[in-house]
Amino acid sequence: MIQMAMNRYLLHVSYIGTSFCGAQRQVTGAFPRANDPSTVQGQLEMGLKQLNPCNEPVVYLSSRTDAGVHALNSTCHVDLFRRNGMQYEPRTLTICLNKHFTKQEVPIRVLKTFLIPEDFHSRHRAESRTYLYRLAIVKADALNVAPHLHLLPVEELQRCLFICTDTFDINEMKRASKLFEGLHDFRTFMARGSKDPDKMTRRVVNRVEIIEGKPLTSCSYSWPSFMCPSREDYQYYDVYVQASGFLYRQVRRMVASLIAVAQGKVSSSDIKLMLEVPSHRTWIDNIKTVPAHGLYLCEVEYLERDRATFRDSLEGGQ
């Protein structure tokens, strides 16, 4: 009789979140669980079933992104039992899953698969997570049209937040961003929709950095030259936020606050007050939470000693 061994795999995945109701499974129930094609976790589990393991694959996400949020490099782990007692080759998992998602036209890609120790947990062992929010500032006077009629590059739709304004002080925004770094109680920046309003809300933000960004493509091929806004009319900025963990919609509300500072709607002192007096009552109502489509999970970082245990093939290490 063949002795079946459990093997645990770490998957690095990317996805476009526009068509998903979030990363975490929403269809619940006892085993065997119903398929959940509306979430990233559900789609991953459906793809893993195509490998015909003798157990029902249960994917554990390292980060639970909201509906509409994208991921450039997220992680998850899964335990698989193979019927012949052999291990699945990590590279085989990557190839088979990507073939499945391509055939089903699902916007998920597996970047890399590792064989990992049985006690490794993709979420609990994560050292930090880095998010990116993409901004494009459009000058209304440069476009010479009403703000709601400006020409947005179609390749950037649902990938970036466009702000049409003549008032945007990036230097003031950068100065205010440093207020978020360090240990703070971010209750003010946690959306009211959190399912656990009594949870601990103190977090350490390692880094908030704002750098000049780039468009996804050159607009010179998108519009005739006589009607194309020049690249100088769009100023892209990338806002990076790194921490060990985040509260519900924390990053989006932090970015919204910084945008409000840049536009002169609030001051750095207002942000400082929201951090020093953590309460939903101190949130300034004219700060509007930025939409999900500009947010990307960039990376989930693990300690070097953990990474040293990952194996990407049956023969050896990385």
Image (cartoon, rainbow, N blue to C red):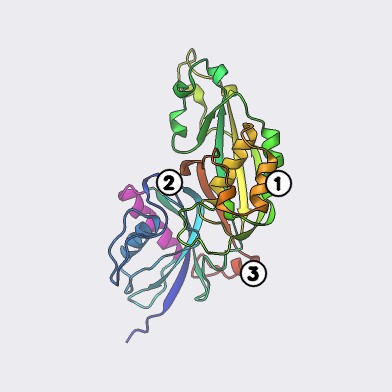
Position above or below: 122 against 297: below
Front in this rendered view, residue 89 or 155: 155
The residue where tag 3 is placed is 305
In primary-sequence order, the first of circles 1 and 3 is: 1
In primary-sequence order, the first of circles 1 and 2 is: 2
Task: Identify the residue at image location x=52%, y=40%.
Answer: 288
Residue 130 seen in this snapshot: no
Position above or below: 64 against 317: above
Residue 94 inside the magenta-drawn segment: yes
| Crowd class of label 2 (few under 14; some 14 to 19; many from 20; radius 10 Å) | many
The residue where tag 1 is placed is 178
Three-letter code, disc 2 = Gly
Q: Which image quarter is the C terminus in?
A: bottom right
Mark 1 vs mark 2: give the one in front.
1
In primary-sequence order, the first of circles 3 and 2 is: 2
Task: Using the numbered discs, state the Cα–Cα distance from disc 3 to disc 2 in whole angstroms.
Answer: 33 Å
Front in this rendered view, residue 95 or 266: 266
Residue 172 image position (x, y, % from top left): 70, 35
Marks 1/2 in contact by CB < 8 Å: the verdict is no
